[in-house]
Image (tube, rainbow, N blue to C red):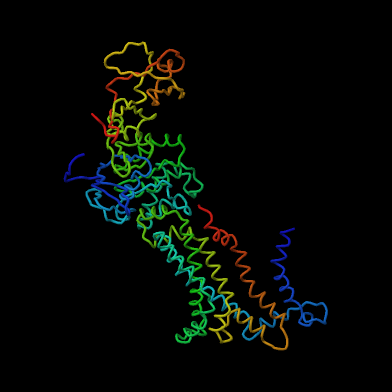
């Protein structure tokens, strides 16, 4: 993270905290989102990602710390004066108004000239392929259409910052995948910083430029998807990203060794071992077919271990039908070591 | 069969009243036979003052009380629905307790108030005690309806830069329409039917509302009971309510059950 430079634009959070009673919902969160950048806040429920979003939106108050947007401090400003647009998880469309009116109401109340409103609304309707739904009420729209209307409403504001709170979580898996690329393109084209809250690692990896992983109100790690995946700073980040999730084996006292399922190979125990490899004897438990890939489950020194391999690979063939003793092997360079007590990475 | 019984049970008295209102007095008190008449209606409509005055008076009192009650209850209910839960609960309990206070005990005090502030024989002034009596119910009903509106809707409006008034006017109140109309109807019906306060606050004949006016008709003579005139008066008095109920029954039902169903 860069230190303070005079012409900072985008969103800057410094030491942001939110406490309610005895509970700390968010602890010393500092991060920056550049204009045109999409940052995902990723974590399980209760990790503080929604709290962060609501503090930035002004819907919740920060207990301490500061929020800066486009060079101005906005920490204490009311939501209306922040120039921030938000897409809610439930979309929060006004149920009694048509799509067109849902989009134009905010502009009309801010006394934008009528002609300008009509132009803008038509442009956004076209951009999001919603022209046919112009006069429909939200209840008459599909989930995907509602999500797009909510996005359209946010786009119309031409805000200095976009906040999206799990905008895909009410859509089915197929639609989610289809919309991901589209959403990314549209958000990117606005040039504004985007903060995107999700609990879905695939969504975060597919959409965001950088990911901030949160747990119980604390930032665990901030970086690109590849960085988080290859070089996690702790056991939590290592387990949260990747599917199937990383295998953690207590191979040394006080220490867990993390092995990604795709880094493991199944071989006959009689195969000679080279120095850069490590190996453990394994008992087969069962197989999961994923079409082109196979997840095989093994028991290794009392722990269960998953191996992900190509359906065509040697590993898959052995996992399926070999009768002799088998071993799991991996390159030592792929090992990730964590302190058993704290979960911290040992390098 | 059960439905038929229920129908007879609820419609019977009304039909009996309707039937009575069209029968000559001689038939009603026994003796004479047969015949239909409009004499009771003619007597009422040509009375001094004509019966329509009472209907109009009740209409004025009902409407003004409804407006006053809603103007006070809507902001109260909104504030309660947005307040911290435990504080809102304390206040709601206090409101419900106020509603449970026996209104009969208020009459003497109200009479004093009417005299000291010269509110007697003033139709609009009657909406003050009426609003006071209707407020608890209206607040509790509307509060439940506000609670049913997802907070995110208002937050979305807030993010769009809408002021409190704009959020109420464009987002919340349109969604509250069923609850507000059913509250309005309950208040209106209460005022339409209210008797003791109207009896004590109004003495001028041309300012009477329906209930005291009908009571006057019933008690106009100590020698005969004017069954026919009384029946005709109740028919005329309940006709507007029936009409309103028929027109708005869907809103009333959806408004009353709103608290039970989450949107």
* Relative depth, front residue between B58 and A202: A202
**Is A58 on the left-hand or right-hand side of A90?**
left
Which residue in the rendered view is the most extreme toward the left?
Answer: A6
Q: In which quarter of the view is residue A326 placed? A: top left
The vertical placement of A279 against A258, above or below, is above
x then y, percent, for residue A195: 32, 43
**Which quadrant would the N terminus of chain B be assigned to in this image?**
bottom right
Q: Residue at x 30, y 19 (%)?
A: A331
Q: Residue at x 28, y 56 (%)?
A: A77
x then y, percent, for residue B88: 42, 62
Q: Which residue is drawn at 56% across and 72% down?
A: B190
x then y, percent, for residue A42: 34, 39
The vertical placement of A195 against B9, above or below, is above
Which residue in the rendered view is the most extreme toward the front?
Answer: A253
Q: How many marks?
A: 0
The vertical placement of B228 against B250, above or below, is below
**Is B87 on the left-hand or right-hand side of B211?**
left
x then y, percent, for residue A219: 28, 41
**Is A249 on the left-hand or right-hand side of B260?**
left
* Relative depth, front residue between A189 and A83: A83
């Amino acid at each position: 993270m860069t230190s303070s430079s005079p012409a900072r634009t985008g969103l800057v959070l410094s030491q942001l905290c939110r406490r309610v009673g005895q509970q700390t919902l968010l602890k010393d969160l500092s991060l920056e989102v550049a204009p045109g950048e999409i940052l995902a806040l990723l974590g399980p429920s209760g990790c503080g990602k929604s709290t962060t979003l609501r503090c930035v939106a002004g819907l919740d108050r920060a207990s301490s710390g500061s929020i800066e947007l486009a060079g101005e401090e906005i920490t204490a400003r009311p939501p209306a004066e922040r120039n921030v647009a938000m897409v809610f998880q439930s979309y929060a469309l006004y149920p009694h108004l048509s799509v067109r009116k849902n989009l134009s109401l905010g502009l009309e109340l801010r006394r934008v000239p009528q002609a300008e409103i009509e132009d803008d609304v038509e442009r956004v309707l076209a951009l999001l392929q919603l022209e046919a739904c112009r006069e429909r009420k939200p209840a008459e729209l599909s989930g995907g259409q509602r999500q797009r209307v909510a996005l359209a409403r946010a786009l119309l504001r031409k805000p200095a910052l976009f906040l999206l709170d799990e905008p895909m979580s009410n859509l089915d898996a197929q639609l989610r995948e289809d919309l991901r690329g589209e959403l990314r393109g549209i958000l990117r084209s606005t040039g504004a910083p985007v903060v995107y809250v999700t609990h879905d690692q695939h969504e975060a990896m597919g959409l965001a430029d950088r990911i901030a992983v949160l747990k119980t109100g604390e930032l665990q790690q901030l970086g690109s998807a590849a960085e988080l995946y290859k070089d996690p700073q702790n056991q939590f980040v290592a387990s949260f990203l990747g599917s199937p999730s990383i295998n953690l084996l207590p191979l040394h006292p006080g220490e867990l060794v993390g092995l990604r399922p795709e880094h493991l190979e199944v071989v006959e125990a009689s195969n000679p071992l080279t120095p850069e490899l490590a190996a453990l004897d394994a008992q087969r438990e069962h197989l999961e077919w994923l079409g082109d890939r196979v997840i095989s489950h093994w028991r290794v020194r009392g722990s269960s271990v998953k191996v992900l391999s190509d359906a065509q690979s040697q590993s898959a063939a052995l996992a399926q039908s070999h009768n002799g003793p088998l071993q799991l092997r991996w390159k030592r360079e792929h090992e990730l070591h964590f302190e058993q007590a704290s979960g911290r990475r040992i390098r | 069969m059960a439905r038929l019984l229920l129908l007879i049970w609820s419609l019977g008295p009304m039909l009996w009243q309707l039937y009575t209102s069209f029968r000559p007095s001689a038939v009603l008190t026994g003796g004479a036979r047969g015949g239909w008449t409009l004499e009771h209606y003619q007597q009422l409509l040509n009375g001094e003052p004509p019966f329509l005055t009472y209907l109009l008076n009740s209409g004025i009192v009902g409407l003004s009380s409804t407006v006053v009650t809603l103007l006070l209850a809507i902001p109260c209910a909104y504030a309660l629905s947005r307040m911290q839960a435990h504080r809102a609960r304390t206040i709601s309990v206090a409101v419900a307790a106020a509603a449970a206070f026996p209104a009969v005990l208020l009459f003497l005090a109200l009479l004093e108030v009417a005299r000291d502030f010269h509110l007697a024989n003033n139709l609009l002034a009657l909406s003050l005690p009426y609003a006071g009596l209707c407020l608890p119910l209206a607040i509790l009903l509307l509060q439940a309806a506000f609670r049913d509106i997802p907070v995110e809707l208002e937050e979305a409006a807030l993010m769009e830069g809408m002021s409190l008034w704009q959020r109420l006017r464009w987002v919340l109140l349109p969604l509250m329409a069923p609850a507000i109309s059913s509250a309005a109807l309950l208040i209106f019906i209460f005022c339409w039917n209210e008797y003791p306060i109207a009896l004590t606050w109004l003495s001028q004949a041309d300012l009477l509302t329906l209930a005291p006016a009908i009571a006057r008709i019933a008690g106009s003579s100590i020698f005969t009971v004017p069954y026919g005139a009384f029946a005709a008066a109740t028919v005329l008095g309940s006709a507007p309510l029936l009409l309103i109920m028929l027109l708005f029954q869907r809103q009333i039902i959806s408004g009353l059950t709103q608290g039970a169903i989450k949107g």
